[in-house]
Amino acid sequence: MLYLCVGLIVCIFVFLTAIDGPDSFARKDDTTVHLSIVRAFLDSGTYSTLNSSSFLDQGTTGSYYPSAWHIVVAIAASCIGGGVGIATNAATLAFTAIVLPLGVCLLLCTVFPNRRGVVLAGSLFAASFAIMPWGFLTKGQLLPNLAAFALIPAAIALFVSAVEANGKGGRARYAAGALIALASIALCQPNGAFTCVIGMASYALCRIFRGPQDKQASITPKKIACAVGLAAGACALWVALFFAPPLRGVVTYGTWDTLLSFPEAMMSALSFMYVKWGGIQPFLSIAVLFGLIAALRDRRWLWLAVAYVIALVIYLGNVCADGFLRQIIAGFWYSDYYRTGAMNALFAIPLAALGFAWLIRLFGSLLSRLPKLKGRETAFATAALAAVFILCQVIPFHISLGKRTIENGLPAMRHQVASLYSWDDIYTADERAFVQQAAALVEKGDTVINIPNDGTAWCYGTDGLPVLFRRTGDNGSTPSPAATNEVIRTRLANIATDEEVQQAVREVRAKYLILLDEPTGDNPTTTDQRYEAAKWEGIETITEDTPGFTLVLSEGDMRLYRIDEVA
């Protein structure tokens, strides 16, 4: 219950009180895809990771895509009448305030069965790292990755239980649970499975030399050989998967230059800022440092430090290396430093709990020297450190260092969430109301031509309007041939006289055109991501006087046109 209460409080502070209503959403590029897939599942009645697409509603054959998160949200949306935005936010609440905290609780109870203080301390840290889980809301969005990482602590706990279980029956049950959890993680986001295996392998490697109940490590030639074999096998599997054709598009993704020097990268990791978008969290840095020291002193928990260091090395390679070296180190995470940083923070959570419990003991021993606090020193130490932790987490501050602005972690996340989930930006509340009116006029099976940068890239996922272009960019993520899309984008205004345009419109079954912004207006609410005016002039130049179009609905600078039938 303590984990749920703390997780909910953090979620309320960072997320629930920051978003602009229960059905608001982040104006991010990846969100267009995630919401559209959920809506396509609802419209088609197909909830399958083997048949996933943003255009299932148009009869398009889907393909394999790790869609476990999308299926969960689609099921939730179907239970509340199709509210994709509300279901998405409910899933975020569930994974950040329930699944992740309870998973951390299970892991700590499994690893520290006789250390109640460590288990209780973990409640403070399960959802308190800025980059994990909250960074997944502000980068991307990476909502399936959030779900995958939230499941990892419980999966590792099941693996540890399987190794330590007495009897084949119990071991088999825990092992089956760990495999199911690992498969679920992979179906949310495959890099979550790689992250989970790092934690499992770290435990297995250290477990060879010392069990949880052993007073000291036992190092023998046989155990050394087993450890070397396990490490070599893991490295061989890593290399084999790196060169596996199905993963080539993932591991070779990301062609950006080296981001940081090694000293800068170390500082960013140890402060839990991770380059940008995040914020420093000084109390967590101290708690994790003490946790590392504690894990090195008591080798039963050394594997926690090993997993943390492996993730740290991957993050450092991600931001400091370049080319092939970066890809083989961090390619399974798209060489995305936000994902590798979140992985490092995930493995820091149990260390923070261990370090906080040690800090309480140290501070309590100092307070025990005060006669008035004799017998109550632990309670006072816990209350004092918890108060310092809360103040360090919630008080906002800004520090300017040259061109960089350093902020406090959770307040920085809250500010970014509030900005992204605002109905005043790109796809506004007024535009949404107009889209909902338009959706009531469009018959099932009809397609609505649009310019995705004016906010309509999101309106299929949020409100079910079947627009043609569902992502910003030339092709708009549509399944139609690029040539067909180009004809529509650049020459639609000529539909009355251009037979090629007429044919292209028939191919995509378009009956309407929607425009939410006047490009030359005083205050257009648009995004310039991948936008080039010349590539959309065939749509943007259409007015009420353009032959072949009949105005159906208008409000302010928003227009819905019916595309007249052309003989």
Image: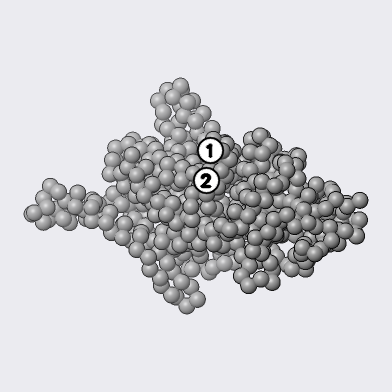
What amino acid does circle 2 point to?
Answer: Ile
Residue 117 placed where, x, y %?
28, 44
Height in image: 116 above or below 22?
Answer: above
Along the polypeptide, which appears first: circle 2 or circle 1? 1
Residue position marked by numbered label 1 in the rendering: 80
What amino acid does circle 1 point to?
Answer: Ile
- Label 1 sits on a secondary structure element that is loop
- Label 2 sits on a secondary structure element that is helix
Q: Which mark is residue 86?
A: 2
Asked if residue 373 lies left or right of residue 34, the reply is left
Taking depth in this image into account, of 35 and 437 the one nearest to the observer is 437
Residue at horizontal 48%, vertical 59%? 418
Q: CA distance from mark 2 to mark 1?
A: 9 Å
| Residues at marks 2 and 1 touching, judged by CB atoms closer than 8 Å | yes
Height in image: 539 above or below 15?
Answer: below
Residue at horizontal 50%, vertical 38%? 226
Residue at horizontal 39%, vertical 54%? 13
Crowdedness of circle 2 by 10 Å Cα count: few (<14), some, many (20+)?
Answer: many
